[in-house]
Amino acid sequence: MATDSPPDSVSGVPYYLLNFERALAWLAQRYDDLLDPHERAFLGTFAVLPQASRALLVRMLMRKGTLFRASRLTYDEIGCPLQAAAPIAALGWLNAAPHLTLDDLFALATRAELLDVFSPTLALIPGARSLRKPELLVALRPFYAGADAHESVSRPARPWSAWHGATTDCVYRVDIAPLCERLRLMFFGNLQQDWSEFVLADLGVFQYEKVAFPPSSRAFQQRADVNVYLALHACREELELIESSSLLFEGNEENAAIGDLLARVRAIEISNPWLETRRAKLLFRIGQHGERRQNWRAALAVYEACAWPGARHRRMRVLERSECFSEAFALALQAAASPESEEEAQRVARMLPRLRRKLGEPAVRASAARAAERSTLVLARPQAPQPVEYVVRDHLTCESAPVHYVENALINSLFGLLCWEPVFAALPGAFFHPFQRGPADLHAPDFHVRRAGQFASCLAQLDSGIYRETIARHLHEKAGVQSPFVFWGLLTPELVSIALDCLPAAHLKLWFERLLRDIRGNRSGLPDLIRFWPAARRYELIEVKGPGDRLQDNQIRWLAYCVQHGMPVRVLDVRWAGEVGVEEIPPHATPTVEPAA
């Protein structure tokens, strides 16, 4: 759908309108069985509206909010907004005289206009004319109770002309917006992406892999699925409102609001596994809110019924915080025997000794895994602030052993280039539209299982040497195409070539297998730097820690994995010369790496 250098219009049709019409045609073709009469009527009627009217509506849909002043809808390709809006308003899609609350008015009017509108009232407020807009709104609220939807109804909302009698402007409200939001959801499969995706693709900002879209790949297989998504989205927005307004709630009021929200989330009937996953994530967030408010009973009840990864560990933490040590210990033992992930195993290993002490249980000596080599590097503090990783890279690199700052980018990218086909396999529930960076089920528990054969074929190339050709081919053919694994901004043919020369295929395979075991947890935490010795065809991974910095859990897990499999990896603790406890470096001396104590 993208073009290399799109014009501002095609045959006189603005590109944004053309793209919107393509999206409507896509929906009519793929979702006709899920559309109701109002949606079908919109598709048919929109197509026969004057071009200026269609363009104006799309312009408004692409902007934030649903309220617009006509004077701010000036576009060369549309002309007079009043004329363009008339046919849309006649259909009831636009309201040309919506009633505005005080908040609505403040969002639309300038400060100068507000001072004019409220001149008589401002005379009663000392210093009001020097207030900024937010302060002015607060000062006016007591005089206009009912102008805000959350207050009493003594002074109801009113049209723009009633607020500002001297104006010749008018305000439109896009009443068709909810219907169009539903269509946007059906097209993208989410409400995070908007119609600007078309524009970014047309301008060449983003390129997307071309994937087949059989009917089975639709995001929604029945109309009820769309309703479920919107219901879950509304509940999520309500949770965010409660979280942002928690200081305004009394304890019992907030508990009642959370309890009502939780009941509604649980009552939603869901038959779609993908949507059930979304509910699990929302329940997890509700449980986290309970934890933050130290409502242990509510948090525990949510986590017990939540299938989102990490919920079992949160249950242990809540039981421990509420001093139910026996229950926490029993659950921790269960998790230790069968952890859901390396992350949970790591957390449980830390929790069990603490729980044993609290219960008076005998300590169990755990076998300590061999730690990564750790050294201290003393350097002169750079004159200009820059990341410590860059300072170390520049200090260590040399012609015979170049050092690159890669962090999570290199190994993820090599994996993405080798396994391009399985990542972009057109499986049901994976790809819904042409603007996806990766499959929708990327973090689903069965992501690998559903593509196991294809991934196995890719990884088998590491045993035969073919993998180099595959990676080089995808590096060339897919350059710039969006991928959840490939970091195009870092990759160069030279970096990929030296990496494939120096990284053993056996190590690549081990890294890729670990990525596939837990993509959500293992795509991050890799060491910051990689040093190559091209002549010897070897490498070293280096994790850099500046003063006061410490290893994160995901970094510890990656380091342990590398050590376990005999990969060259170490941690460098950087200290700045001249700081307390750090030996000063003589002028012009070469900083050295000293063994850690």
Image (spheres, rainbow, N blue to C red):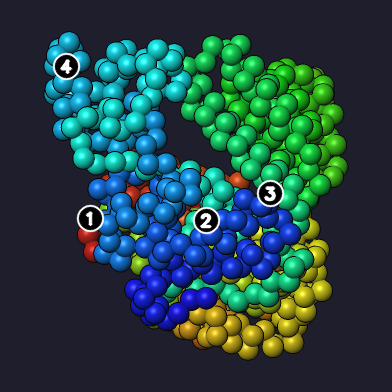
Name the kind of residue labelled 2 in the image. Answer: Gln
Q: CA distance from mark 1 to mark 3?
A: 56 Å
Q: Which residue position is annotated with label 3?
A: 226
Counting from the top left corner in percent of width and height, residue 586 is at 25, 57
Residue at which label 4 appears: 120
Disc 3 and disc 2 in contact, CB within 8 angstroms: no
N-terminal label among 1 and 3: 3
Q: Amino acid at mark 4?
A: Pro
Mark 2, residue position: 193
Disc 4 to disc 3, C-alpha distance: 49 Å
| Vertical placement of residue 582 versus 48, above or below | above
Asked whether residue 412 is in view, the answer is no
Say the numbered circle drawn on residue 383: 1
The residue shown at (29%, 13%) is 143
In the displayed structure, would residue 20 be above or below residue 305? below
SS class of the residue under badge 3?
Answer: helix
